Image (spheres, coloured by chain):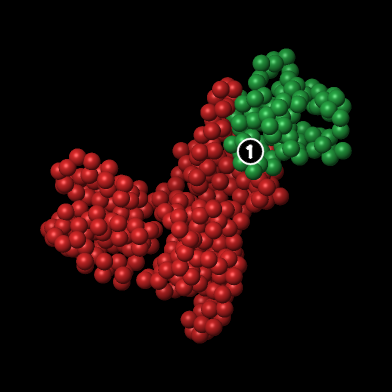
Chain colours: A green, B red
Amino acid sequence: MKLKKLKSELTEILNLEGVDAIFVISEKGEVLIDLSTPKNKDLNPIPLLSIVKALDNMKEAELIFESKRLWIKNIENNYLVLIANPHTSMAALRLRCDALFST
Amino acid sequence: MKHRILIVDDDQDLLLILKESLESYNNSYEVLISGSVQNALIKLQSESVSLLISDLRMPGIDGFTLLTYVNQNYPDLPVIIMTGYPYKDVDRMSYEKGAIGFISKPFKIQELEALIRKTLQKQTEGGTLHDISIPLFLQMIEMEQKTATVRVLNRATEKRGVLFFKNGELLDARLDNTSGLTAAREIISWDDVSISIENSCNLNQRNIQVSLNALILEAMRVKDERPKSQQTTGTETPNLRVTPDKTNKVLTSVQAKLKNAFLGRWIPNASYVDNSWGKMIKSIQEISSSLNFGDLKALYLERKRGLPLAIVPDEEIVVLELDSTCSRDKLLRVLSL
């Protein structure tokens, strides 16, 4: 899928309740897509790659912090990082993203 | 299960006091005493010992020599040094030579007992398993690329063997006075065992060169050739539940949360304490602090190899091995409460 179309689809997901930001980061640390809600516009995606690196050999991870929830998925050589409210129900969001990347 | 502790000191009065005090303080301790290093070496060859406590200054062979010998020949056996040696840095030297604990004379029996308890707890930090098939368990260690010292108790014969794993590779084994392939083959052929897991391994050198699968096949052959009268039954059903060390409150608390939330309808494949995840958790915490995300409450992790895991960082790190029937959202909600 072309980057522009992917960005548009991910923007729709960003508008769902509880989602704060979505990033697509390459293994080399290049931020390919940077989407965040106005409240979270200061979120820096670069440190997120360090979390990905810490999760050695990761295919998929979900981290629950006190104030945020992170879902990370390895898609080919890139990482999709979705940041949400810690109480957001993620099953539907994951399904939607999975469908998006399987096309 | 009794923990056998060997105490070596040339002061006979002190040995008798320590034996009597420790055995009456904790009835799970069986204390063996030895007035010299030479005598201790004979005891080590004939008795299965969980912990060695040694003085430093003794006539003939000293405690440092014993410490070095034990590290080379019994790498799974922890050593505590107790001494009234007046020189500075003697504690540092003891640790450098491989002691895991140090206590200066004079000491209170409670202090020594606390040190013993802490040391013995480490031997079961990864949990204790009962009624498990050893081959299945070892394949799991290999698949998970775990580093561990695995102590196996043959409940029928009371024999104790040790297997040393680094990153899932079986490096060595020890059983009585044998080591390497011979010891590993015998241990793996046992039925009716209890296994305790220490999440570290002091060995680096590989002494077993055959693959684990080949070794398991060989052990099964040894088992089949054993006279029927020596075989025990009743352990054919693999049971991967890890029973918590009774003193491990963190693991017990996580298991209780799961039981309440899932009402027994779902349980993880295994649950255990594995503090080797500490480094990774610390890195994540440092990064998340800079992002103001707060503390990490729970983590779901699916890697390129192995089962998906849920990891709960607390005073100790609890790891749950998951299956596909688990509701991830519910599990993470429960674990992060």
Q: Position of residue A23 (x, y in %)?
A: 73, 27
Q: Is residue B223 above or below residue B75?
A: below
Check the picture and name the quadrant holding the N terminus of chain B: bottom left
- Where is residue A87, by image quadrant? top right
Relative vertical location of residue B159 with respect to residue B312 in this rendering, above or below = below
Q: From the viewer's perspective, tell me whether residue B68 is left or right of residue B287.
A: left
Residue drawn 58% across and 66% down?
Answer: B211
Give the amino acid at mark 1. Answer: Leu
Up-down relation of residue B229 to residue B200 (above or below): below
Mark 1 — residue?
B332
Residue B121: in sight, yes or no?
yes
Residue B226, percent across and down? Answer: 51, 82
Front residue of B186/B260: it is B186
To which quarter of the image does residue B66 belong? bottom left
B205 sits left or right of A30 in the view: left
Question: Quick one: SS at disc 1?
Answer: helix
The chain ID associated with circle 1 is: B
**x, y percent for residue B40:** 24, 65
